Image: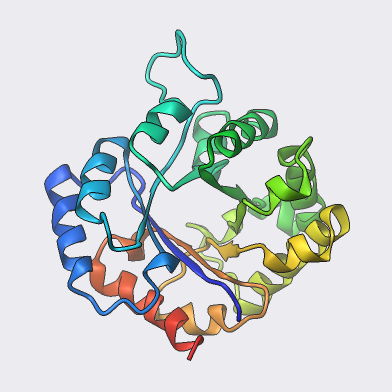
Amino acid sequence: MKKFLIAGNWKMNKSIAEAKLFADQLKGENIVYPEQLAVIAPFTQLETLKRELDGTGIKVGAQNVHFEKSGAYTGEISVSMLKELDIDLCIVGHSERREYFAETDSTVNRKLKALLNAGITPILCVGESLEIREAGNAMLFVSGQITEDLDGLTPAEVEQIVIAYEPIWAIGTGKTATPDQAEEMCGFIRGMIEGMYGRETAEGMIIQYGGSMKPSNADELLKKPDINGGLIGGASLEVGTFMEIAKAAFELQK
């Protein structure tokens, strides 16, 4: 059966009280596969979410981490700090981190290794800009990201990673990625993983789509063979819309 992961990325939104309310409302939903849901929140809300969602099977994730164990890195959070909270997942290489905070493939690689060593599942984000897509170099660019990001990792380690494809060109540009375009790139990524690490690793990998998935397009996207879920932004801020997307995935598993 095809595996899914529906992960809500709250970005820089919500208070601790709002996070608790969200968790309370989420627990009131009929969740068929709770292990396929994740809430990825700002650091200040992680402890509350872990406590409120304890025993539900729903995963809690962080949005960023530093690769060093400790030291003079003001404002940063270490892997051990996430581990202390029993965090399940952590985003690495999100397009906003790459664009606004100068995150490189080299630092992404180091973060991946630090998370894997701690047993925290990384969600690796890759994707191309509008300029790169219009130049016809989308797959070349994404393949370069994946090659550098996964450098030095074994097949067993790569099997623990979730990859999220973010078409940056379709975010805030007025252009829209069609389900076929999303599937084309996700299929390309899976094929690349197969070439690097073998069929078993590729077939078992969860590859998410991270380009404005919402209730109106979730079903069509999730039906695609190489899309195993979504990294959801705005639509994850309300339990209703988040669960509509989750239920689309649940329906496909009946």
Q: Position of residue 57 (x, y in %)?
A: 35, 62
Residue 189 falls in which quadrant of the image? bottom right
Q: Where the N terminus falls, by quadrant?
A: bottom right
Q: Residue furthest right?
A: 195
Question: What colour scheme has been applied to the protein in the rendered image?
Answer: rainbow
Q: Position of residue 52 (x, y in %)?
A: 19, 53
Q: Is residue 238 above or below residue 59?
A: below
Residue at 62 percent across and 51 percent down: it is 161
Q: Nearer the viewer, residue 27 or 186?
A: 27
Residue 250 falls in which quadrant of the image? bottom left
Residue at 34 percent across and 66 percent down: it is 235
Q: Nearer the viewer, residue 149 or 95?
A: 149
Q: Is residue 103 above or below residue 239?
A: above
Residue at 63 percent across and 28 percent down: it is 107
Residue 81 falls in which quadrant of the image? top left
Q: Residue furthest bottom?
A: 254
Q: Nearer the viewer, residue 202 or 189?
A: 202
Q: Position of residue 155 (x, y in %)?
A: 77, 49
Q: Is residue 136 visible?
A: no
Q: Is residue 59 visible?
A: yes
Number of marks drawn = 0
Residue at 67 percent across and 52 percent down: it is 128
Q: Nearer the viewer, residue 134 or 204?
A: 204
Q: Position of residue 5 (x, y in %)?
A: 49, 66
Q: Is residue 11 above or below residue 27?
A: above
Left or right of residue 184: residue 182: left
